[in-house]
Amino acid sequence: MNETHSVAAGLDYVGVSPILAHHKETGRVRFEAATDREVIAALTLTVRKEGIIPALESSHAFAQAFKEAGSLSANESILINQSGRGDKDIFTIADALDDPSWRRFILDKAEAYRAGG
């Protein structure tokens, strides 16, 4: 097996569950890949447009949905299972975005919590 890497630690595994393998074999699901850059762009767009911070694992699904949305007809839909909240990933997200104002906000909040405020 090849080593994996993802900005989303929950996807950094070298394997797949038997249930997912079965669903792929029976055509119930298909699997696509997204780069870290695509995932961060999808996360950013979701935050700006929807006001939610999806988990990095869920942001992979958003990235693929955004790639495919333009090719759908008016009566087709995309359903995304948002598996978690991104607040648990807030420090990883801040590093990945490399946004100085967000980084400062996170550091200030962390310091306030340490100070008891």
Image: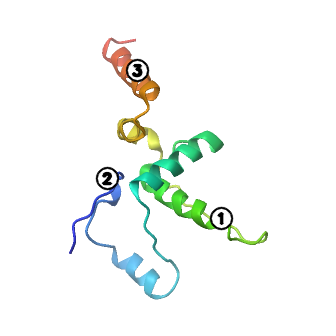
| Image quadrant where residue 12 sits | bottom left
Left/right placement of residue 10 relative to residue 70 reads: left
Residue at screen point 46% across, 81% down = 23
Task: Mark 1 vs mark 2: give the one in front.
Answer: 1
The answer to which of 40 and 86 lies nearer the viewer is 40
Image quadrant in which the C terminus is located: top left
Q: Helix, strand or loop at disc 3? A: helix
Residue nearer the viewer, 63 or 90? 63
Query: Sequence order check: which comes first, mark 2 or mark 3?
Result: 2
98 or 105, which is in the foreground? 98
Which of the 4 image quarters holds residue 91?
A: top left
Q: Earlier in the sequence, mark 3 or mark 1?
A: 1
Q: Amino acid at mark 3?
A: Lys
- The answer to whether any part of residue 83 appears in the image is no
Can residue 34 be spotted in the picture? yes
Residue furthest toward the right?
74
Q: Position of residue 114 (x, y in %)?
A: 31, 16
Kind of residue sitting beneath label 2: Ala
Mark 1, secondary structure of its residue: helix
What residue does disc 2 label? Answer: 9
Mark 3 and mark 1 in contact? Answer it, CB < 8 Å.
no
- Disc 1 and disc 2: Cα gap in Å? 26 Å
Q: Quadrant of the N terminus?
A: bottom left
Binning the other alpha carbons within 10 Å of mark 2 as few (below 14), some (14 to 19) or many (20 upward) gives: few
Secondary element at image label 2 = helix
